[in-house]
Image: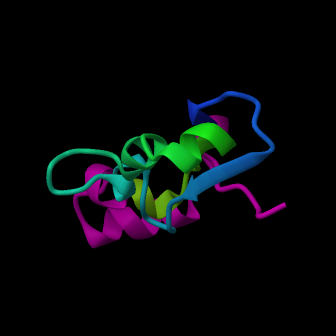
């Protein structure tokens, strides 16, 4: 899902995409500020670019939050019961 931080219909887009086990908080610094918000304040970016971040589901993202044991994790890998909104999507 693409979430726009700044959308002014410019010809340029700065798109933030997290890693395999990341999320929106990948772009947060130690002061709890998002890098894309800081970047949006730069004059050249403000005048020329839209900014967005792309979030996608990856099964490992939920691993630590929802699995209490290694056995539970292994079972979840082979489970066919995945909510459609929480399916890993191909690159295409």
Residue 40: x percent and y percent?
47, 42
State the scheme by which the image is colored. rainbow
Res 48 quadrant in image:
top right
Is 80 or 87 nearer to us in this picture?
87
Reply above or below: 55 against 90: above
Say whether residue 83 is visible.
no
Is 84 or 22 nearer to us in this picture?
22
Is 13 or 67 nearer to us in this picture?
13
Residue 10: x percent and y percent?
75, 37
Reply above or below: 46 against 58: above
Residue 37: x percent and y percent?
40, 41
Residue 88: x percent and y percent?
65, 56
Horizontal side of 76 relative to 86 (left or right) equals left
Q: How many numbered marks does the figure carry? A: 0
What quarter of the picture does the C terminus occupy? bottom right
Say if the magenta span includes residue 81: yes
The residue range painted magenta reads 63-92
Q: Residue at x 59, y 33 (%)?
A: 4
Q: Residue at x 51, y 58 (%)?
A: 59
């Amino acid at each position: 899902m693409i979430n726009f931080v700044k959308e002014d219909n410019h010809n340029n887009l700065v798109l933030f995409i997290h890693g395999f086990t990341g999320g929106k908080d990948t772009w947060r610094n130690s002061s709890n500020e998002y890098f894309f918000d800081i970047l949006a304040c730069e004059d050249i970016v403000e005048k020329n670019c839209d900014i967005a971040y792309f979030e996608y589901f990856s099964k490992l993202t939920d691993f630590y939050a929802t699995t209490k044991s290694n056995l539970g994790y292994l079972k979840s890998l082979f489970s066919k019961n995945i909510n459609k909104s929480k399916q890993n999507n191909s690159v295409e």
